Amino acid sequence: MKAFVICALLAVSGFGLYKLFQNPEKYLKKKTEYLIKLSSVKSSKVDMALISQVTKIAKFIHYDVQVKAEYEGQVYQARSLNEFRSHLMAYFRQSSTGSLEYENLTVQMKDHKKRGLVSFDAFFNRASQKVFCKIVLEWEKEKKWFVKRIEVHSCKPVN
């Protein structure tokens, strides 16, 4: 019994040390890849599945998020988490395939590792064409990491 308690304490303290000294660049890269994966899942038309998917993504978004997306000459903006959720629901309902591929993912740490800029090139597979966009996510650490700003720009169709 003593050995079990000692092993459990060692495991808990090891996990705590891992979390305490975790490399923020690796963490932001991993979480950004997770958000990309959630965004690229083929969405169903069932409202509960869409709401579940949006809720999983929204866990990582700051309540005061600033979103600016330029696509086909239009600018889409959101200045709060609720507006962002609305745009996200529209994105999932509208997309037919919904797949999203990315490359050139880079992480830059700022402000003594309290802010991180993640940029990558994204390829959206729409029904009739593939669209290329540059995306920048600004992560900010409060008690945990949240996406504070999202920019989608330089979107153009790929032949």
Image: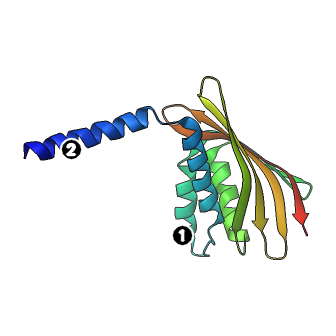
The spot of residue 143 in percent (x, y) is: 48, 32
On the rendered structure, is 32 left or right of 8? right
The tag earlier along the polypeptide, 1 or 2, is 2
Quadrant of res 57: bottom right
The secondary structure type at the circle numbered 1 is helix
At x 60%, y 34%, the residue is 140
**Viewer-side label of 1, 2:** 2
Whether residue 78 appears in this view of the structure is no
Residue in the picture at 56% in, 49% down? 30
Residue 104: x and y, percent?
74, 50
Residue 134, placed above or below residue 110: below
> Identity of the amino acid at label 2?
Ala
- Mark 1–mark 2 Cα distance, whole angstroms, equals 37 Å
Q: Tell me if 133 is positioned left or right of 31 in this view.
A: right
- The residue singled out by tag 1 in the image is 49
Instruction: Say if residue 48 shows up in the picture.
Output: yes
Residue under label 2, please give it.
8
Q: Tag 2: Cα neighbours inside 10 Å, few (<14), some, or many (≥20)?
A: few
Which amino acid type corresponds to the residue marked 1 in the rendered image?
Answer: Ala
Whether 64 is drawn above or below 96: the answer is: above
Residue 15 picture quarter: top left
